[in-house]
């Protein structure tokens, strides 16, 4: 499902927008004043405010699909457990996890096999409820509690049925797009007598049929963003496979592979040390945004320069499970991470209490959680996106931030059309469209999503924490929000999920601001004396 999210906004939201310009290289690290783009001013900050200053190396936990810890741009910034001996099958540091060298994997088993794809939480919730209520009416129920649960079942059933219909429509749409692009590619390759298709080839191709014109437009749009057409077709194939792989299968039981007692929310010591796993594109991309080695003349530069990345694998291709998320938070906290990036989310959370308790635990240990707001163009003031900062008791966690996504485009197109928003729930916005970062096997790609915006903020938070280690999560959150750039607060932008409905940017988040490292460091300097 994470891969589908990455490409969904690209094909449909952006096909209708102007694509005459290519995204600036490294744009998320650039400066709005110097470079005229809504980056977070990373390069300017290091040059003007942090040059020659000392920093403390901190650990950032990437709770995700896995990280390629051997990647050329990440291997030097990976956390390595100092008290664990690799490959000896012994829990050397006695933390309960055997051979956790660069992190841990909560979606695998002790024999080294891993869960790659899982179904949606909606599917799991509907299955449980349907086994209890299928074929029944409200008249069949004896008490108020059962009647209340039955009404919830009816809501879930309607949601599930709608998801099935939407999934089928998306599969057909993606297949149409794949066929249209493949037709264009085949024609170009045949005419050239070559297996390569360039952006220039796409520009020069004269499409005759409407289907070909659409294929050309989409392929050219992605080529301008840096994605080669063969990679685009590969992404489409993966997305179609994912949608057809059982996300809505009521009879699927991928969890059996893990071998835990899933009903026991207190169980913690399961999984394996393979914190890369397969399908680590998403997590590796996130890790690179936060902390890919800076100024090594390889690939790209992350935001933070004094970070070690801890990979905690808990997100499959599908919906993550509450038990794994809760344990991933606790593992990262217990092993020294002070900032956690959580670029995942879902519509249902049947064991929210377990996640809430883990968030509270992180709060008690001084750990900041950065969470992607989601990619459904929803107002999450009204439609909850889990996990969330609001606890079951109604209180909000002080160490939890939700992040919306921005495009590198300016004016009315600056907000990513897929981004969730919320004047009471989303704290800030950050770059999240056409973000160039690391992918497995020493590769690099452009991805889009609030999944990319969250690690930009996590990187900024990590710089603050490394140069001002005495700052608490609450203080870092306050700095990030108060120092966010409000230049476009009153600007009319296209409301996510609509074609042309205009709203003021400040209506989409608490701050109406864009995270900015330069302004955050200046504010921190006013609070804490920086080391020199």
Image (spheres, helix red, strand yellow):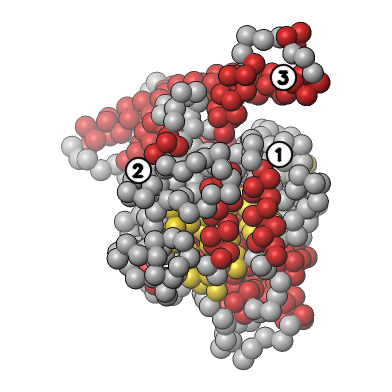
Q: Which residue is mark 2?
A: 231
Of residues 125 and 374, the one drawn nearer to the viewer in this rendering: 125
Circle 2: element type:
helix
Position of 135 with respect to 440 (left or right) is: right
Q: Is residue 144 visible?
A: yes
Whichever of callouts 2 and 3 sits on the residue coming sooner in the sequence is 3
Numbered disc in front, either 1 or 3:
3
Q: How many marks?
A: 3
Of residues 405 and 309, the one drawn nearer to the viewer in this rendering: 309
Q: Determine which of the numbered discs, if any, sits on residue 384 in the image.
A: 1
Circle 3: element type:
helix
Disc 3 packing (10 Å; few <14; some 14–19; many ≥20): many
**Image vertical order of residue 217 relative to residue 293, above or below:** above
CA gap, disc 2 to disc 1? 34 Å
Whichever of callouts 2 and 1 sits on the residue coming sooner in the sequence is 2
Would you identify the image quadrant in which residue 39 lies? Answer: bottom right
Q: Which residue is mark 3?
A: 150
> x, y (%) of residue 15?
53, 35
Whichever of callouts 1 and 3 sits on the residue coming sooner in the sequence is 3
> x, y (%) of residue 131?
58, 19
Kindly check if marks 2 and 1 are in contact, taking CB atoms under 8 A apart as contact. no
Of residues 317 and 267, the one drawn nearer to the viewer in this rendering: 267
> x, y (%) of residue 109?
38, 47
Position of 435 with respect to 73 (left or right) is: right
CA gap, disc 1 to disc 3? 21 Å
């Amino acid at each position: 499902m994470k891969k589908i999210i990455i490409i969904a906004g690209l094909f449909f939201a952006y096909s209708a927008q102007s694509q005459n310009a290519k995204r600036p290289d490294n744009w998320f690290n650039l400066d709005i004043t110097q470079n005229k783009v809504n980056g977070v001013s990373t390069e300017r900050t290091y040059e003007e405010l942090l040059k020659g200053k000392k920093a403390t190396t901190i650990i950032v936990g990437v709770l995700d699909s896995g990280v390629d810890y051997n990647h050329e741009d990440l291997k030097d910034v990976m956390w390595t457990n100092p008290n664990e001996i690799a490959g000896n099958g012994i829990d050397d540091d006695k933390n309960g996890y055997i051979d956790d060298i660069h992190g841990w994997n909560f979606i695998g088993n002790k024999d080294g096999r891993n869960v790659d794809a899982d179904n949606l939480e909606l599917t799991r919730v509907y299955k449980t409820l349907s086994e209890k209520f299928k074929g029944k009416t409200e008249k069949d129920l004896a008490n108020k509690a059962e009647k209340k649960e039955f009404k919830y079942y009816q809501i879930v059933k309607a949601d599930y049925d709608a998801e099935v219909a939407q999934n089928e429509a998306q599969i057909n749409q993606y297949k149409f797009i794949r066929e249209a692009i493949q037709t264009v590619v085949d024609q170009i390759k045949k005419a050239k007598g070559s297996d390569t298709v360039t952006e220039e080839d796409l520009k020069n191709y004269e499409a005759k049929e409407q289907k070909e014109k659409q294929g050309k437009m989409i392929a050219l749009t992605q080529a301008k963003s840096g994605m080669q057409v063969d990679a685009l077709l590969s992404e489409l194939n993966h997305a179609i496979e994912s949608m057809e792989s059982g996300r809505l299968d009521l009879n699927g039981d991928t969890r059996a592979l893990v071998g835990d007692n899933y009903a026991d929310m207190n169980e913690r010591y399961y999984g394996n040390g393979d914190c890369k796993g397969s399908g680590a594109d998403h997590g590796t991309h996130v890790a690179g945004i936060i902390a890919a080695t800076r100024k090594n003349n390889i690939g790209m530069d992350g935001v933070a320069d004094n970070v070690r990345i801890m990979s905690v694998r808990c997100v499959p291709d599908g919906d993550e499970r509450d038990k794994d998320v809760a344990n991933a938070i606790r593992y990262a906290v217990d092993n020294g991470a002070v900032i956690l990036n959580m670029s995942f989310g879902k519509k249902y959370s049947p064991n929210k209490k377990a996640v809430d308790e883990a968030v509270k635990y992180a709060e008690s240990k001084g750990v900041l959680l950065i969470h992607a707001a989601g990619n459904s163009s929803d107002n999450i003031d009204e439609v909850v996106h889990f996990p969330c900062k609001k606890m079951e008791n109604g209180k909000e966690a002080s160490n939890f931030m939700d992040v919306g996504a921005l495009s590198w485009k300016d004016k009315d197109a600056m907000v990513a059309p897929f981004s969730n928003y919320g004047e009471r729930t989303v704290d800030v916005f950050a770059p999240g469209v056409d973000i160039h970062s690391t992918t497995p096997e020493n590769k690099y790609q452009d991805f889009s999503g609030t999944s990319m915006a969250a690690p930009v903020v996590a990187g900024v938070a990590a710089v603050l924490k490394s140069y001002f280690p005495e700052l608490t999560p609450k203080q870092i959150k306050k700095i990030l929000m108060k120092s966010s750039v409000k230049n476009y607060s009153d600007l009319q932008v296209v409301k996510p999920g609509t074609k042309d409905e205009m709203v003021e940017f400040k209506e989409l988040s608490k701050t109406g601001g864009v995270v900015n490292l330069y302004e955050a460091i200046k504010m921190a300097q006013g609070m804490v004396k920086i080391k020199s």
